[in-house]
Amino acid sequence: MAKNQGAWGLEMGVCSMKAIRLEMQNGSPVATHYDFIDHAKILSQPENLQDQDKMIKEALLKFLSRNKVRGDLVCLSVSSQSGLARFVKLPPVEESKIAEIVRFEAKQQIPFPLNEVVWDFQKLGSGMVIDGLALDSEIGLFAMKRDFINKTLLNYRDVNIDLHAVQMAPLALINYIAYDVLGKNYKADGSPAIESDDDDAPKKGVLGLDIGNDISNLVLTDGTKIIEQRSISIGGSRFTKEIAKEFKLTFAKAEHLKRTIAKATTKDGPDLKAVITAVKPIFQDLVGELQRSLTYFSNRHRNIEFEYMLALGNGFKLHGLQRFLQEKLGVELRKPGKFERLQGDSVIKATNFSDNLLTFAGAYGLALQGLKQVRMTTNLLPPEIVAERQLKMKRPWAVAAAAAVLLGLSTYSLKNHLQARAWTDPTVTKSIKDGERIIGDVSKGKKNFEDAKSNVAKEESNVKSLLSGQDERFNWLDLFTYLNEAIPRQDGTNLSEQQRAAYWNVAQNRPRGEVAYKELVRRQTLSRDEFGNDGYEPGDTLGKNIDQLIEFNIESVDCKFTENLSGFWQQVKGGGKAEERKVKEDVRPIDHWDKSPDGAGWVVELRGYTFQLDQKRFVQEVLLENLVRYGIVKNSPANNAEAPAAGAGLPDLGPVVNRVSHVLVYKYLTKKTNERSNFEIIGQSYLANAMRAGGFGEGGGAQGGMPPGMMPGGGEGGGAGAGGSSRDSWTPIGSTGASASAGGFGRGGMGMGMGGGPGETMTGPGGAASTATTTGAKSNHTRTEFVIFFIWKEPTPSDAMRATAGEGADPIAASPADATGGGAGLTSTGPGKGIPRGVIDPVKKTNIGRPRGDAPGNRPPLNQPAAVPVVPPPQ
């Protein structure tokens, strides 16, 4: 089987050479080979400089004798001491001219003529693009002297190793951290696979410190837009020189003592304590340099938080160094025990690889760059060499293409000859005539078939028109499934990243939703933590941290239908006599404030309350945003081409999703109380008053798939204009006369108890229902009552079945009394309203054919609402 093309990452250090080969298998990088070769001497020592090239070639020849690189990509790292890195914010510029403006910036930032350096750049932050103008674009600019790169590449050219990429060592470390430690994935151009929208949100970054022999590289990244690097001129050789000076040893003996002091058992020579004391001044110098670098990073990125620092390089094998740096810097240092995302047991389980794991991070990052799985994709290989590599790769294809052209020309005349001979053959002529006769017979049969098919379709349409509306009876189940999924849950499972950052995650030692949920579980399981905390505060019956709990108690769900959504929306925005005027921030999505809905549809009302301390803002940023996020999905293709169209520009995902809009905080009230009853505003519905205030009717009769006797609009029959009952006269089961006159469902209607209280006995999307009150208790919490409106444009394809009667048709005859169970004929409320239902138009037809039990709509299934789990007490 042919070998997959792999990528080698080579790092030529002054003490050793590290190499690792990766290839893609089942979409993931897998390590297949590695090599670790120690140099006979330290390359950077003055006495070894004249033999430096010789020792590098010896290492490369030894590497080639044990490994094959032909057909693979080879990426090499070079020291950042000989390079230059700048991070620049570009002025506003057209996207097509970014390369030109970067070249201008390169002339300003690089202190050498551009023809004397090899340079490259990469966009780190795209900013905004308005009318083709890129704003706040940030780029990383990297350069290195051309003569230094050519001298470095000469050793590899001499041993016939073709390099495909040259990268600065700190950027290779960043690639390792971003992919393996932070778990990020990237496109081929280095941009994150998932873009972060909020640049101002707090970010967590990971530091990496690689202590080499001569220099140490410090890097910082969050895996997206934050890229920082700095080289520090303190490395392992400084420790060796200090030991040699203190104990009057040769450099070689001091290096041996440094590497073996922690394992030494002999009493001859200095002990561990004496060696640590000798190198302590170097430790202090290193801490000072690191502190200056961290201060610079913090000033450049105000919203960054250093999560921890990775300890890389064999320099950290020096006893006591990790602990000393951790204490002085105040940042946790972690030594990687393995590469988290790397596969390939033949490599990762090798003893030599595990013993030197800390030194392979750079080579790992280089190999990932060869596979195009990294953040930083810059390449400092001279352009003329890149062109040579590309030409060399294309040469076999060019030869094959030329051979194919010659073969095609040689067969062209033969093909023409054979074609001409076939057409002049008498047998062919006879066959053509027979074929034309058969085609005529087939066409006649096809016409007869189409006529029969048309007659069947007409009969099918007639039958379906008698059953119109049956396929839409599932729509209301879909609506409640959508509400179950959208209403935020106490365990935070259906919150977005932004919502979790604002209301779930602990921030600045302040308990938020996660802590409050753990307290809720303690109350539910009647358990205590190690400190005896049972989830309650003395004198507070609601429970500890109730004002941080992600809890929405939905007391009732109501809805009304209107033929004039635009008039309703303008009236609600302006505020009626009894309602306060609304503002743009009360609406989600915010751009719907200026977009009036058109046509007819349902206005759905949610009434409920919460004890969360952020009050109205919590309702807007969590409940409203979730209703929009679950109700408007823009990136899923529609597979049902014959289904009714959803909102403008949105895919069809069923009867609810992408048919929800204009989510509005219609009314809210805050009150200092611990009670979960005795409400001020949510005991009644506001739908009837909101609709009646505008002077337009709500429409009449059943609409869509609401079954007779269940529809919140009155009966199965027609509207007021058709002699049917008005929607205002409908009274829900279990409601009082007062609630019915207000148009609400009340507690006995379609209201859903989704709240959470001290009892927490039932679980819904917003929490557990409770009827407990705290009358007379100290009111140390604020209860926010809220009334939410949103618009749902239910698809009703069955309206097309209820077509108008033909010219001269008798409506009474077309819809006899006994066809509807007695009385006048049923009247449509959709297009052609006022015409008796049951009149069949043989021209119109529809294709609704969802059998009973099918999943509603054409969209991915919604997750089922999860009950609050009964778990062991949190630790």
Image (cartoon, rainbow, N blue to C red):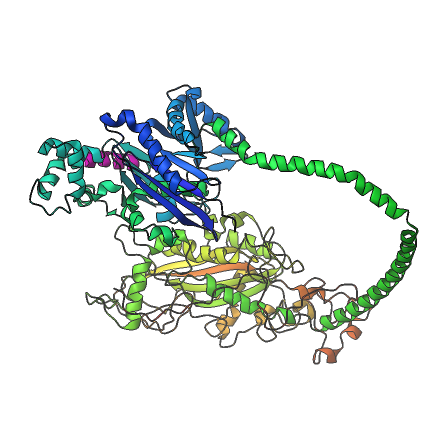
Occupied quadrant, residue 290: top left
Q: Name the side, left or right, on which 211 lies relative to 320.
A: right
Task: Identify the image quadrant of the C terminus.
Answer: bottom left
For this orientation, the residue located farthest to the front is: 65
Task: Judge whether residue 786 can be spotted in this image.
Answer: yes
Q: In the picture shown, does residue 508 fall above or below 131? A: below
Q: Nearer the viewer, residue 828 or 363?
A: 363
83 and 328: which is toward the camera = 83
In screen coordinates, is 846 left or right of 679?
Answer: right
In the rendered image, the residue lying farthest to the top is 113
Compared across the picture, whether 356 is left or right of 189 comes to: left
Residue at image x 42%, y 33%?
A: 139
Magenta stretch contains residue 54: no
Q: Position of residue 154 (x, y in %)?
A: 40, 27
- What is the quadrant of residue 310 in the picture? top left
Q: Which residues are magenta?
A: 286-299
Q: Is residue 200 visible?
A: no
The residue lying at 30 percent from left, 44 percent from top is 305
Q: Main secondary structure of the magenta part?
A: helix
Where residue 13 appears, x then y in whole percent?
A: 30, 35
302 relative to 786, above or below:
above
Q: Where residue 150 sits in the image (x, y, percent)?
A: 40, 25
The percent position of residue 81, horizontal first and vertical second, equals 31, 29
Q: Quadrant of residue 369?
A: top left
Q: How many dots with numbers?
A: 0
